[in-house]
């Protein structure tokens, strides 16, 4: 790995600024320790290299086309500077101005944050992934372009950075090499938030330049607003899928599963991440089984977009977040439900619970609760019979950053697992000190070109290591082991890590949500609910 300096960000080079080599990454434990056994990274074709900006680290997450001429490049630079000024103005950034300026003004350069960042650590210390690398470039550009005499001072202090296409396109890619897990913010002795710098950069790119990952914007927000769901499912398709699942599982499990739709005045409107319905239908089915067994008066909505709790605006543009969450709550208001419950989806929790608190006013501010606390109340109340001996296999728990570190919901899911999984063990560290799955900030659903290779082998490396260590007493495939990940995006990332390394075959690992374990422990279910060959 080539060492690099901050001012090199603007240097036009043929080679990437700091490419990743598999040999540089922190080694994994056996049987994943042999570099030659690892699948390797997809190579970019000559055509892709020509077409897209790929000179940051040789990874392409964003397919940003290069500018056609000098005029287009100038336009990009001008828009970027205008965006910087807006981020630093009260009128345009009232929501985040204060924490942003604190982070810009008070960094003691102690590097405590670097020790806590899984991307930087697992990359083997690649400078461009250091939390403060991104922030320092941003800080210098802010000073140069928004402060009086900033350009002259930058030269005098030898902190000048040329703002050209190369700087901006590299910063754009770099803003998607941080999973916004905010572990660095928790560790910072000054309370500064490098994850927020990532957020603000992404917001600038989206709002000023119209740049956002296709998976988050076109296929995410836009599709949700026009079709109803980031999965592309229209209301009729969602209802068909769920009723097919209800019928199928009722027959297999020997109990009647029925999902209520559009019940006016229900106590609870449950909103899933619709990805669950397509990829892991056993998760919404488990919710239905538990809520029905507990006698909850609940409903799903078939009105777009309230059958999909996804809100990718959280990751790149607050304005888009507000559009989605407002529509969610308009449907809840129309139904007249007493409460909205968020399914097992971390970013949905953060978007709908905390950020939405700043947006929802009047009668749109309907009470909202995490499914983890809601389901824990049911389990603790004894309303459903549970037999822990049915879960007699090793289980560990992944803490989704948005639910655990960012919202502080730490114990409810653990109290459930201690009650129903006799062989539950923690990962280390866990709770608010957890490590991200590596797919946070939208990364889990981004897979263009060779980005998936990066997120499973660099940003997801620490999580894979933690999982292997949690099960180090039975490392082989003979004993089946379950990683409980109560978040749709985290599950997608963990699935991709397991597939990449062949972890199901080599280590007997599978993954799933929390509610599936609860249903697996219900004596009235005739066949085991956990399927060990989940893909
Ligand atoms: S831990 Fe905080 S003060 Fe120290 S370098 Fe990181 S951001 Fe700056
Ligand atoms: S938010 Fe997470 S990934 Fe991003 S710099 Fe901080 S610790 Fe690293």
Image (spheres, rainbow, N blue to C red):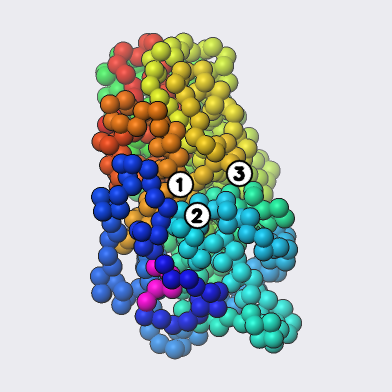
**What segment carries the magenta color?**
15-19
> Upstream in the sequence, badge 2 or badge 3?
2
Labels 1 & 2 near each other (Cβ < 8 A) = yes
Q: Measured along the vertical axis of the image, is residue 145 above or below residue 506? A: below
Q: Is residue 344 left or right of residue 374?
A: left
Residue depicted at 55% across the width and 83% down the height: 162
**Foreground pick, 171 / 278:** 171
Q: In which quarter of the image is residue 240?
A: top left
Q: Mark 3 points at which residue?
A: 406
Q: In this view, does 183 lie to the left or right of 466?
A: right
Q: Is residue 64 rendered to the left or right of residue 78?
A: left
Q: How many residues crowd mark 1 within 10 Å: few (<14), some (14–19), many (20+)?
A: many
Query: Dot 3 surroundings within 10 Å: few (below 14), some, or many (20 or more)?
Result: some
Q: Residue 121 carries which label?
A: 2
> Which one is in front in this view, the residue at disc 3 or the one at disc 1?
1
Task: Measure how far apart labels 2 and 3 are at the Cα level.
Answer: 21 Å
Q: Is the magenta stretch mostly helix, strand or loop?
A: loop
Q: Are marks 2 and 3 in contact (CB under 8 Å)?
A: no
- The residue carrying mark 1 is 462
Residue at 31% across, 13% down: 526
- Relative to the observer, which residue lies in front, 511 or 77? 511
Asked if 44 appears above or below 160 in the picture, the reply is above
In the image, what residue occupies the spot 34% across and 32% down?
475
Q: Is any part of residue 219 visible from this angle?
A: no
């Amino acid at each position: 790995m080539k060492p690099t300096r901050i001012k090199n960000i603007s240097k036009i080079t043929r080679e990437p600024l700091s490419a990743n080599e598999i040999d540089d990454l922190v080694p994994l434990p056996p049987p994943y320790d042999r570099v030659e056994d690892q699948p390797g990274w997809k190579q970019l074709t000559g055509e892709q290299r020509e077409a897209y900006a790929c000179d940051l680290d040789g990874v392409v997450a964003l397919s940003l086309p290069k500018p056609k001429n000098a005029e287009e490049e100038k336009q990009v630079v001008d828009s970027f500077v205008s965006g910087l000024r807006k981020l630093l103005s009260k009128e345009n950034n009232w929501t985040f101005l204060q924490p942003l300026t604190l982070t810009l003004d008070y960094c003691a350069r102690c590097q405590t944050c670097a020790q806590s960042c899984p991307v930087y650590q697992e990359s083997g210390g690649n400078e461009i992934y250091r939390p403060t690398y991104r922030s320092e470039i941003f800080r210098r550009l802010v000073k140069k372009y928004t402060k009086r005499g900033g350009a002259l001072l930058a030269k005098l202090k030898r902190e000048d950075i040329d703002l050209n296409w190369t700087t901006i396109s590299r910063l754009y890619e770099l803003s998607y090499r941080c999973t916004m897990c905010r572990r660095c913010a928790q560790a910072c002795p000054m309370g500064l938030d490098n994850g927020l710098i990532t957020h603000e950069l992404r917001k600038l790119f989206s709002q000023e330049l119209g740049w956002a990952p296709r998976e988050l914007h076109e296929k995410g927000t836009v599709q949700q607003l026009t079709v109803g769901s980031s999965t592309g499912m229209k209301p009729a398709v969602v209802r068909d899928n769920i009723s097919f699942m209800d019928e199928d599982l009722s027959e297999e499990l020997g109990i009647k599963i029925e999902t209520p739709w559009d019940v006016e005045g229900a106590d609870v409107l449950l909103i899933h991440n619709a990805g669950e319905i397509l990829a892991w239908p056993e998760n919404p089915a488990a919710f239905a089984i538990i809520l029905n067994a507990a006698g909850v008066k609940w409903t799903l909505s078939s009105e777009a977009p309230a059958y999909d709790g996804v809100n990718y605006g959280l990751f790149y543009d607050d304005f888009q977040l507000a559009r989605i969450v407002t529509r969610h709550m308009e449907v809840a208001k129309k139904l007249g439900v007493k409460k909205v419950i968020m399914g097992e989806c971390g970013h949905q929790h953060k978007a709908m619970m905390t950020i939405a608190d700043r947006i929802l006013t009047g009668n749109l501010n309907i009470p909202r609760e995490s499914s983890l606390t809601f389901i824990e109340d049911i389990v603790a109340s004894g309303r459903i019979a549970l037999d822990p001996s049915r879960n007699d296999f090793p289980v560990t728990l992944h803490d989704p950053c948005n639910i655990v570190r960012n919202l502080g919901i730490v114990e409810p899911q653990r109290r459930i697992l201690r009650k129903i999984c006799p062989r539950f063990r923690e990962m280390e560290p866990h709770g608010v000190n957890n490590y991200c799955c590596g797919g946070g900030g939208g990364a889990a659903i981004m897979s263009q070109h060779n980005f998936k290779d990066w997120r499973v082998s660099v940003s997801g490396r620490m999580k894979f290591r933690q999982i292997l260590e949690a099960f180090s007493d039975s490392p082989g495939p003979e004993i089946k082991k379950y990683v409980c990940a109560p978040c749709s995006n985290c599950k997608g990332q963990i699935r991709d890590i397991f597939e990449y390394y062949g972890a199901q075959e080599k280590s007997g690992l599978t993954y799933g949500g929390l509610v599936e374990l609860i249903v697996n422990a219900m004596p009235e279910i005739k066949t085991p609910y956990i399927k060990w060959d989940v893909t």
